[in-house]
Each structure stands twice: as C-alpha cells, then as structure tokens.
Image (cartoon, rainbow, N blue to C red):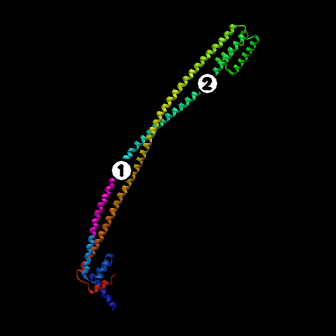
Amino acid sequence: MKLLVLLCIVTLTFADQRIDFFNKLSQSDFGRTILQTIQVQENNVERVLQFIRQLQVDINAAQTEHTNYLQNRNGQIAQYITEADQALAKAKQQKAQDEAQLPLKEEELNDKRAQGETKFAEKQRNLDRIAALTAEREESKKAYDQRRTEIVGLLAALNQGKKLIQQIKTGSVFTQQEIFADIEHHHKKFVQRFPDRRGFNSLVSLSLAMAQDSTLKSDQSALERVVQVIEDLADSLFQLQKQEMEADDAREAAFQQAIARLEIANQSLEGAVAYLHAQILRLEQSLLELQNDIATQAQMVVNKQNEKADWLNIQRDETKSYGKQTENRKSQLDLLGETENVFSKGPLTPEQQSFLQHLK
C-alpha cells in the first residue's frame, strides 16, 4: 500500500507543474523561506498571496532605499574625491613653490656662511698681527733696555774715571801713584764688563787708557784735555741716551696706535660676525622649515592620492555590491512573481499539499 502511494506521488510529480515549482523553490535559500511560510499557512491561499505581495513590497522598498543610498553615497564620495583632488593640487603647488625656493635659500645661506668665514679670518689675521706686533715690541724694548743699561754703565765708567783723574791735580806723589793704580784697575774692570770694542765702548776705553799716562801728573794741560775728552764723551752719551729714549717713545706710540687700529677693526668685525651668525641661524631655521614643509607636502600628496584611491575603491565596491544585490532582488521578485502566479490559480490539491508538507 505504501509503495502504491509513493508511486502515485512520483507520477503526480512528473505531471504537476505546481509540484515542479515547489521543487524549484527548494533549490535556493530564498525559495526554502517561501516554502516554509507556505507550509505554515496550511493551504490558505489568501494569506500566502498576502505574504508574497508584502514581501514584494518590502523587496522593492529595499531596492529603492539601496538605490537612494547609493546615489547619496556616490554624491558624498564625489565630494570627498573633489576635496582630495583640491588638497592634492594645493599640496603639489606648495611643494613645487618650496622646491623652487630651496636652492635660493641654500645659496643665500652659503653666501652668509662665506661672509662669516671671511670676517672671522680677517679678525684672526688682526689677532695674529697684534701678537706679532706685541712680540716685536717686546724685543725692541728688550734691546732698548740693554742699550740703556750699557749707556748708563759707560757714563758711570766715565764719571768714575773723571773723578779719579781730577784727584791727580791735588794729590801727593804717593797719592798720585795710588790714583793711577786705581785708574788702571778701573780700566781693567771696564774692559771685562764691556769686551766689545766698537763704538762708544772703544772711545771710553781709549779715554781711560789715556788717563793712565804718568805724564799727566806733571802736565796739567794734558790732564785737562783728557778730562775734556771724558766730558765730551759723556755729553755724547747723554745725547745718545736721549735719542734712544725718544726713538723708543716713538716706537711705543706707533705700537699703541697700530694696536688701537687693529682692536677697533676687530670690534667692528666682531659686530659683523655676530650679525652674520644671527642671519645664518635664521636662514638655517628657515631652510629647515622649508625642507620640513617639502616633506610634509610630499606626504600630503601621498596621503591624498591614497585617500582618493580609497574612495574610488569604496565606490567601486559599493557599486558592485549594489549590482549584486539588485540582481539578487530581481531574482527574488521573479521567484515571488512565479509563486504569486501559482497560488492565484486557487488552493493546492490534497496531493500537492501532501507533497509540499514533505519538502524540506
């Protein structure tokens, strides 16, 4: 008996279009959802049709809503892309302007650095010149002090010789012999102290040698001549001492003037170097800011290009998703239309109802 029922059902399956359609519904998720609803309605055609028509309304509303959303979304994305394009153009323009200024800033900075180096080198040359002049002046002072000491020594030797010679006039014979011995001893000490026989040294030595002539004790005229020679030599040495002093004073004045000029020049150079240093710092900061802005604008270009690409990808994906969902909704509406057509022909037969209840 069961076998006979099954055979009947199979036979009806091949012969009944509704059953063919029910089989078709069972092949998709949406179709199975329709089948489950139909099964629940227990062959209530009106309720099935009401459900189908409401579902059609809902799907059409969803399609309309999706269409409106996509239109609005495309408008938003178009605005975002326009804004990205504007920002991209602005960043490219600013980057180009910065890059055009960069070599000018670098050239200006290098020029200021070169000026600073030139001023600093000039200041250093002045310092070197001051050091050289100071060393030269120290040497000239040393030479002057040595010469002055020598002149003072020569004058002292002459004065001592003159003093001894003048004692010859009033001394006794015994005393005169001692005086000549003192003059000889004085001469020897002079020669030891001033071994150089050039210039005044030789003249002083010669005058002391003349004072040792024993005939002077009996020849007052010769004695006076020796004294006169000594006095003339002393006068010449005094003049030489004066000339040496004046010459050294002139050297000191010239030295002080030269040092003053160099120090004034260096004060001016220090101001120029400080001013150039401040300009260099300002230009270095400006150059750094310009380089940073170039890097910032370059990153902005990359960011806006990526942002634009992202929005285009989003637009493409959402359009693609819209197309798939539209196609899916069309398929659903087509299936609902077929279902409505099937049930608009009246209730299901017992055989169809039985078949429907056994579908999963």
Q: Contact, CB < 8 Å: mark 1 with mark 2?
A: no
Mark closest to the chain's N terminus, 1 or 2: 1
- Tell me the chief SS of the magenta region: helix
Marks 1/2: CA–CA distance: 78 Å
Magenta run includes residue 297: no
Residue 61: where, in percent of width, then height?
Answer: 26, 70
Front label number (1 vs 2):
2
Residue, disc 2: 145
In the image: residue 214, left or right of residue 96: right
Give the magenta-colored segment's residue range: 62-87
Q: Amino acid at mark 2?
A: Asp
Residue, disc 1: 92
Q: Amino acid at mark 1?
A: Lys
- How many numbered dots are placed on residues in this image? 2
Residue 109: where, in percent of width, then height?
Answer: 43, 41
State whether residue 210 appears in this view: no
Q: Is residue 179 above or below residue 330?
A: above
In the image: residue 360, left or right of residue 251: left
Circle 1 SS class:
helix
Q: Is residue 311 above or below residue 188?
A: below
Which of the two residues, 11 or 22, is positioned nearer the viewer here? Answer: 22
Which residue is rendered at x = 27% and y = 65% of the image? 68
Residue 252: where, in percent of width, then height?
Answer: 55, 25
Q: Quadrant of the N terminus?
A: bottom left
In the image: residue 286, left or right of residue 212: left
Residue 113: where, in percent of width, then height?
Answer: 46, 39
Can you tell which quarter of the image residue 133 is in?
A: top right
Which of the two residues, 224 or 329, is positioned nearer the viewer here? Answer: 224
